[in-house]
Amino acid sequence: MKVRQRAVALYFIDKLALRAGNEKEEGETADTVGCCSLRVEHIKLYPELDGQNHVVEFDFLGKDCIRYYNKVPVEKQVFKNLKLFMEDKQEGDDLFDRLNSPMLNKHLQLLMEGLTAKVFRTYNASVTLQQQLEELTDPNESVPAKILSYNRANRAVAVLCNHQRAPPKTFEQSMANIMTKIDAKKEQILLAKKELKEAKKEAKEKDSEKLQKVLERKKRAVQRAEEQLMRLEVHATDREENKQIALSTSKLNYLDPRISVAWCKKWNVSLEKIYNKTLRDKFAWAIDMADTDFTF
């Protein structure tokens, strides 16, 4: 039974990037759990649900009192083992009553020096970022659009690791401010295009070097305003998509920085757009090491 419980716990830690559990900050009193400290009340088993077989429903408070809720299909043997673990137990009983995170990590250390449950989490986070960047990055996109793709890839990691947050108190107001800027920029573009049309007409009627310069200036004004609008719209999309996701946690603690550095170098994106100065200093080794061909 001990081996079965350890195997199922590792399955969840690997497939779902769950924290091992059993570790709490000093003074923490909230009923937070991780994989090894799950209780019977934290999961429900469904032989069939929404067209999928062997579904497990998780619902518990994880680190920092962030709710983890997920419905996932699992291997048949995992499902059978979970039913076995829950037999003759009450809601408040431990699901893995013969396992804790120190025992799990001790076993992993026997398999490989330095291997812990957290390594699975960091590995899966980095693999997810690498895969998402390859899928989402469009070589023909502008730099702001590429940064949006990067943040979406990072968001997939944050969702995997359950890095949630409450929307900032100023979110609604800041979004309203951005939308006001977008509306103003659209008006500016309409005016700029009107002026460009008039400049074209005048340059056609009176062929002069001065009018050609005016025409070129009007063209650049339209182009510049459209680029500014695109950046504002990308920024608005980014803010909306990530209002309840904490992107910085995975970036700081879980992702191999060489992935981000290589991506920036490959697509000529300034590293300052991805890492602040503190992180650039922290990951100086990765900046020196990773080239455009690095793959995790």
Image: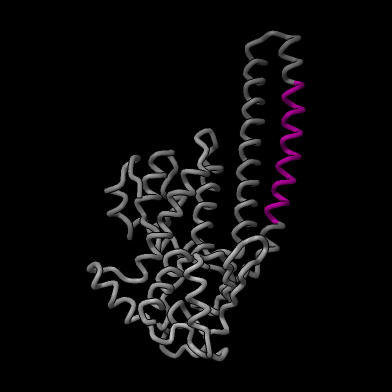
Q: Main secondary structure of the magenta part?
A: helix
Q: Quadrant of residue 218?
A: top right
261 is higher (above) or lower (below) than 108: above
Foreground: 160 or 94? Answer: 94
* Residue 192 shown in magenta: yes
Q: Is residue 57 visible?
A: yes
Foreground: 138 or 68? Answer: 68
What is the image's colouring?
one colour
Residue range of the region highlighted in magenta in the rendering:
177-198
Q: Is residue 253 visible?
A: no
* Residue 50 shown in magenta: no
236 is higher (above) or lower (below) than 192: below
For this view, does 217 lie left or right of residue 136? right
- Residue drawn where x is 40% and y is 76% of the image: 4
Tag count in the figure?
0
Give the x, y percent position of residue 112.
24, 67
Give the x, y percent position of residue 281.
33, 58
Give the x, y percent position of residue 47.
61, 70
Q: Quadrant of residue 61?
A: bottom right
- Residue drawn where x is 75% and y is 15% of the image: 202
Q: Quadrant of residue 194?
A: top right
Give the x, y percent position of residue 81.
47, 76
- Residue drawn where x is 43% and y is 69% of the image: 13
Foreground: 273 or 48? Answer: 48
Foreground: 268 or 186? Answer: 268
Quarter of the picture holding the N terminus? bottom left
For this view, does 194 lie left or right of residue 169? right
181 is higher (above) or lower (below) than 204: below
